[in-house]
Amino acid sequence: MRETERIGSLKGIGEKTEQLFNRVGVKNVGDILRYYPRGFEIFDDPVPIGSVEEGRVSTVAGSVFRRIQVSGNQRMRVTALYLKDLTGTLKVVWFRMPFLRNTLGKGGVIILRGRVVRKKEGLVMEHPEIYYPAIKYEEKLHTMQPVYPLTAGLTNNAVIKAVRQAISCVRVKTDILPEEMSVKYHFMPYEEAVRNMHFPEDKEYFAAARERFVFEEFLVFILSLRRLKETENRAKNSFIFADQEKIGKFLKALPYRLTDAQMKVWNEIKADMQGEHVMSRLVQGDVGSGKTVVAFLALLLSGLNGYQGALMAPTEVLARQHYENISDMLKDYNLPLKAELLTGSMTAAQKRSAYERIQSGEASIIIGTHALIQEKAVYKELALVVTDEQHRFGVRQREALAGKGTMPHILVMSATPIPRTLAIILYGDLDISVIDEMPKNRLPIKNCVVDTGYREKAYAFMKKQVAQGHQCYVICPMVEESESLDAENVMDYSQTLQEEMGDTVRVGYLHGKMKQKEKDEIMDAFGRNEIQILVSTTVVEVGIDVPNATVIMIENAERFGLAQLHQLRGRVGRGKHQSYCIFMSASKSDETKERLDILNHSNDGFFIAGEDLRLRGPGDLFGIRQSGILDFKVADVFQDAKTLKAASEEAGEILKDDPELEQPCHLELKKHIDSRIQKIMLETTL
Ligand code: ADP
Ligand code: MG
């Protein structure tokens, strides 16, 4: 079987499953070989029930004690049982699986594996996997089971099966690394490496397999950038941006003065837009450093000169927030431009009239999600494209933007701090601006790291803040990678919290499974302070700006990465009021403590990124996966900095010997580079 064959040609994959695979980007059997797990489950021996800990995934063995109960309503049946061994009993619940009462009621030892959380009644294991009879667990004991990214309807088992089949019957393609190089770096042979990316014998095998693909990815990427730079001269600037008096007036009228850093970056952008070539500039600035107003200035300059500018945000909530801010600013400062919103959840009629205003040129600042790049959106004269929170966009979402304008200027805003040295290797010829200063009116956020015993006090503290007119976020613990369970968790939690807070405080919730309209309503209500406490999953992480919010409490903080925690924390401390971040964690491990300690003592994103790198080091198997321009499947620019450097040096050697990549040993490599170049062009020329 060849790699290009449809995924549906594997045994056992019907039309429906094929569609699910397509949804996660797996089209052919080659894709599935490269559909890597996001982690592994390591199956350990069961632990005594008396010793299970909150927040952990554990395996327990025992027998059912008392009756198995099914409660709840039609929509949400909850099955509960008590599992008992010599050391204690543990409550276990499942959602929407009422039939378990019959299957598990037959006696004998059951093995359960799941996460233990703390509820009012004590520790509860939620929605565990079931091994019954217990002997079934033995096959898995001490193995590493891949855990794949999924979508609703696609199970981990289905992916495992498909990968197994693909590995055994796909004729593996030619190695893309020249043999010489594989020998020099002792890389695992390609075929063996593929297998070990999915089903490693142990951690060492996995690390060795991963190393190979990391190197390969970096090498292809760097070679692509270098070749691109040599062949492509930057496109000429075909737009004329005259200085605009109105912009100066706007800056004077703003209630605050731009920081020196904002001013510096704005001047760099302006110089680019008025320069000889088309701009492609990355603006990096920590959360809250004020990137939006800088983007707005660029959009103003293009609009006032009679062109269109587009701002693309990664979520609808964020797009709408930008739209409202920008519309308000246009109105408040008497600027004669029209902003337009375009998002996927708008009705067909709303979209149609938006398209009309975009095509006619009546709208000059167009804000939206990736709906901006849909076929039907036709621009009159698109001169500037801004993407916000760039790292959230995947390649596919941006591909369609190619050809929307004739070589518009590109501005990319990112809150992910990348050390400058890395940025220079990675971004090649993309110019970089850094907003390295916070607005002056800010008080540094006060942090604390506490255990769950502090929860009551935290609630009391939030109540007090609300009484003073402020608002709070609570980030709800994540449930094992299942969106629907996350949703239930958020709803449960907000209900409990509402009871705790009493009638004078309104608690709302937000999660990824809600309809866009509901999300908008909740965000609006929160923005107007009609909701005082917002319980949410990490959907609030990106860019939301409610300056009146002063407290963020993050439950199960140990489950998030440092960078993500920093982003979450950035939701507060955005106004002039003293703000607080409460990291709540039940974990007592030293590693967790050290990680949270870093956040506790620093609010500086660049410093945190550096520490993140130091801490995770090469020992950590999985880093954060970058996306956007840094669209790597396995490689991580922080964690694999050393490999990046090696690949960069090898790339130099290769180009010195064989600049056109014509030698036979570089043929396969060249194929990959060419397709990668295409992708990069689509991304950066939009
Ligand atoms: P981010 O860089 O995270 O996107 P925003 O652009 O959303 O940050 O800005 C955060 C908040 O700071 C906004 O409410 C904005 O109005 C405000 N702000 C931006 N620049 C300044 C400044 N120079 N002085 C005071 N407040 C500012
Ligand atoms: Mg922002």
Image (tube, grey):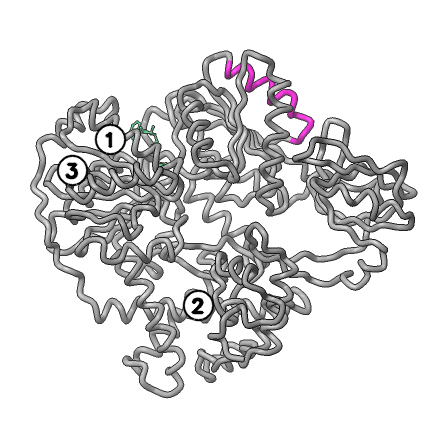
Real-space Cα distance between discs 1 and 2? 40 Å
In-front residue for pair 311/166:
166
Identify the magenta region: 451-466
The residue indicated by pointer 3 is 362
| Residue drawn where x is 47% and y is 43% of the image | 608
Q: Earlier in the sequence, mark 3 or mark 1?
A: 1
| Residue drawn where x is 66% and y is 44% of the image | 590
Contact between marks 1 and 2 (CB within 8 A): the answer is no
What secondary structure is the stretch in magenta mostly built from?
helix
Question: Quadrant of residue 463 in the image?
Answer: top right
**In the rendering, which numbered label is found on residue 145?**
none
Disc 2 C-beta below 8 A from ligand 2: no
Position of the C terminus, as image quadrant, is: bottom left
The residue indicated by pointer 1 is 258
The residue indicated by pointer 2 is 217
Q: Amino acid at mark 3?
A: Glu
Q: Residue furthest bottom?
A: 664
* Residue 496: image location, x then y, percent: 64, 24
Q: Is residue 452 magenta?
A: yes
Contact between marks 3 and 1 (CB within 8 A): the answer is no
How busy is the neighbourhood of tag 1: few (under 14 within 10 Å), some, or many (20 plus)?
some
| Residue drawn where x is 59% and y is 55% of the image | 154
Q: Amino acid at mark 1?
A: Leu
